[in-house]
Structures are given as C-alpha cells and as structure tokens.
Image: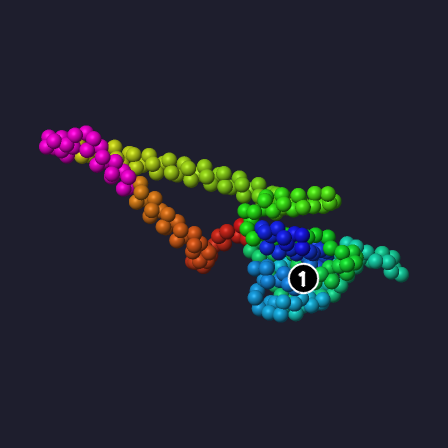
Amino acid sequence: NDLEDIEEIEFVDPNITIQSLISTNYATRGILVKSIIPKNIQHYSFFDEDLFKDDSLNDNDIILGSSLAENIRAKVGSQIKLFSSNTISSPFGQLPRSISLKVKGVFNSGMSEYDTSFAFISLKNAQKISGIGDEISIIEIHLTDLDYTDIAKEKIENKFLNKDLIIRDWKEINKSFWVVLSTERTVMFLILSLIIIVAAFNVITSLFILVKNKSKEIALLKTIGADSSNILRIFLLVGSTIGVGGTIIGAILGSIITVNLENIRRILNSLFNLNLFPSEFY
C-alpha cells in the first residue's frame, strides 16, 4: 500500500523468481520460473487475451515462452516436470524439490531472452518449489511511464530509507542491453548528422551551380534595375524552398515507414525469404 501511494507507480507485483530445470520426455532445459498472481495478469500485454478470460492460473498450470516450448517440444496440454535447486530430505538422501505441471499456454514477448528462458506459475507453487513458505523474494514495481524511472526510484528510496532493501531499476537489471542501446543511439546520431551535413552540402552545391548557370539572367535583372539584395533574396528563397520542402517530405515518408515498419518487415521477409530484425538481437 505504501508503494501504491506513489503516483508514478501503476501496480505492484510481489513474486518469486527462481532458477529451475524444466523437463519433458524430449529435453531438459535450465530456466527462470516466475510467479504471477491473478489480479496482475491483465497488465502483461504479451499474454493472449483468450489465455486468461477468467483471470486465473490454476496450481497445476504453467505458461512457457514460445522459444522454450519449441525447444522442449511442449504444447498446450503437455505435461512437464519442474525441478528446483532447493532440496528436501528423503530416505534416499537429499532430493531436489519437483512438481508436475500442465502447459496452459505459450507467450511471445518479442524478446528472445525471455521467450527462451522464462516460464510463469502460480505464487503458491513458486513458494512450494522454492521452499520459502508464505514469503516472497521480489517486489516488482511497474510504472505508468518508463521516463519516471529515476523519479520513482528516488521516492521509493526515501520512503524506505531505513529498511534493508535492494532497489534496482530496469537499467541496472538489463545493464548490458542499456549500454548497447545507448551506444547504438550515439552511433545513429553521428551517422544521421553526417547524412544531414552531406545533404546540406548538396543543396549548397546545387545553388552555386544554379547561380553560375543563371549568370546571364542575373545580368539582365541588374540591367533592368534589380540590386544585389533582391537577387540574393531570390536564391535564398530557392534554397529555403528546397530545404523546407525536403524536410517536410522526409518527415512524412519517415513517419509512414515508422508506423508501418512491422508490415514492411513482414512483406520483405515474405518476398525475399529474409529474417529482418531477428528476435535474438532486436
């Protein structure tokens, strides 16, 4: 409740995230299993709407990432076995905690890292397999806008100043991704700046050529009484028209391409049998 009082926070999701092994008759993979509570299901946009019409996740259900399901050859309705690194005592010694689950659905987040290594189960099962009882290990905080990250983090730190808590934002958790993204933005800025400089030189060169080719017309204008400032304004108007017109057309075309980028990608993939923007990298 203290967290939800912060206006930048959309909802709070207490959960457990544990390292586990998932096994089928065909394969075994190491994954991260995350608990989820029914009331927060609607906030996860990558879940199909039909998957949780009743906003419920039964204790024997599990939801797999699309790539993970493909790797272990599991589909909706398949039975899987989940093993935890936590152990229990038995007559045969220490054995890993395990649970049998049924695949309720498959999600596609668009990020290869998540689709390959993440699965969701109920909070009750996560507590059972992790062996921590009724406790939780993580409180995830979802904001109304990512731009509020630093503001919200500062408010949370001030509110829980004397508490023994570790607060990490998405930039820290995905530090390598954030560094790559920042580097990519810098490189793209430099490339686009060079393109703009080259385009500006092209406009200037075109104006020089235009002035040279119109030398007779300029002489004629001066003969009939036009002064240098009038002629200069004419060529400034021509240059401004080219620059502003090019900017407007470029902005319109760029906006159209940006809005329809996914459709363009699908068309190019279909026509040329390519895989533009593979999920492993984008």
> Residue sitting at 54 percent across and 43 percent down?
181
In terms of secondary structure, what is the magenta stretch mainly?
A: helix
Rendered position, 77 above or below 274: below
Residue 71 inside the magenta-drawn segment: no
Q: Position of residue 190 (x, y in %)?
A: 45, 37
SS category of the residue bearing label 1: loop
Q: Position of residue 225 (x, y in %)?
A: 12, 31
Left or right placement of residue 182 versus residue 35 in this view: left
Residue 223 inside the magenta-drawn segment: yes
> Residue sitting at 74 percent across and 65 percent down?
100
Q: Position of residue 66 (x, y in %)?
A: 60, 60
Q: Kindly identify the amino acid type of the residue bearing the numbered disc 1.
A: Ile
Check the image and tell me how it is coloured. Answer: rainbow
Residue 24 seen in this snapshot: no
> Residue sitting at 63 percent across and 53 percent down?
5
Residue that badge 1 annotates: 37
The magenta region covers 217-242
- Label 1 crowd bin: few (<14), some (14–19), many (20+), radius 10 Å: some
Quarter holding the N terminus is bottom right
